[in-house]
Amino acid sequence: MEQTGTDSIVAHIRALKEERDAVILAHNYQIPGVQDIADFVGDSLELSRVAAAQRVPVIVFCGVDFMAETAAILSPKKTVLLPAGDACCPMAEMITAGEVRLLRNRFPDAAVVCYVNTTADVKAESDICCTSANAVNVVESLDARQILFIPDRNLGRYVARFTKKEVLPWEGFCIVHDRFTAKEVTEARRMHPGAEVLVHPECRPEVIDLADHVFSTSGIIRHVGTGPAREYVIGTEVGILHRIHKLYPDRAAYPLARHAVCVNMKKTTLSTVLSSLERMEPRIQVDTAIAARARTAIERMLAV
Ligand code: 13P
Ligand code: SF4
């Protein structure tokens, strides 16, 4: 049987992966073809745990820069490749290490909790990291009464609903999730009256108020498999629908809005994965001193 172009790229990736002794990790927002060749697909927390546990020398990280940086910080001796070298998270650029230092001066008794969607420099200035899957537990694990939550204002406000601590969120946001509106939720409920609405905590408070449940990306996927409804409206990036449809073909899942596309997550293609394995580039490297301090914040999170 004749091989298609895609089959041939996939075969090359598989062969090179063996040769290089590499593992491929992909975030739930990656394009279907990339999710399908990955060894692990998951949310930020799952992928950072998987990256930390890897014994192979090469990690190909199909996601955005902060995720690959986290893997490189946790595994300094490994080669971490980010196939789309320019895939960034705009939210991570919304706070700098200098701004965190200024915050610390202003609120000397507060603990700094930083979402993993941050640069290594910012992690290095923080007490502990969190992801959307563990943010409430991380905040509750701290002794401090006052929490500087950076950089996502929406996740910060969401966490504030579940704790007696004073949460002071920074004014960052996700350019994809912050665009969902309450009107879109109302319209989706009208179109799909039997569906549950599941949203990500990066959504605005008024969207969260109207949802049935709020989860990380993998939490959303799990709930579609175990929840009581047959139909779900999904308020996060549309790439997640591939995994939902694949795992639960008997359940219907609709995007809350078709505009929810993270262009940076779509920069990784089968061709960039192949090329990164061929060239062993683009490689993510983090300054040793910064990485050591950032690792403390990430490892504290993994211990919670
Ligand atoms: P998760 O950790 O829930 O996968 O979210 C990552 C992210 O970037 C959401 O926009
Ligand atoms: Fe960053 Fe938003 Fe894209 Fe997630 S969806 S990587 S938070 S821009």
Image: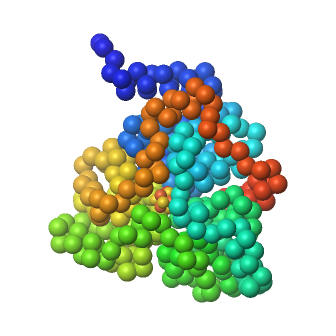
Looking at the image, residue 42 lies above or below residue 220 = above
Q: Quick one: which residue is furthest to the top in this view? A: 1
Image quadrant assignment for residue 25:
top right
Quarter of the image with the C terminus is: bottom right
Q: Is residue 59 left or right of residue 173?
A: right
Q: Position of residue 201 (x, y in %)?
A: 46, 70
Q: Is residue 263 above or below residue 97?
A: above
In the rendered view of the protein, which quadrant contains the N terminus?
Answer: top left
Q: Let me know if residue 194 appears in the view.
A: no
Vertical arrangement, residue 246 with respect to residue 12, above or below:
below
Could one spot residue 33 in this view of the protein? yes
Who's the residue at 37% across and 56% down the image?
A: 261
In the image, is 173 to the left or to the right of 241?
Answer: right
Position in image of residue 177 (x %, y %): 41, 66
Residue ID at (47%, 42%): 268
Residue found at x 73% / y 85%? 107
| x, y percent for residue 127 | 73, 69
**Could you tell me residue 297's position as x and y percent?**
72, 62
- Name the residue located 53 percent from the left edge and 58 percent from the top edge: 89
- Splitting the image into 4 quarters, where does residue 126 fall? bottom right
Q: Residue furthest right?
A: 289
In the picture provided, is 75 more to the left or to the right than 10? right
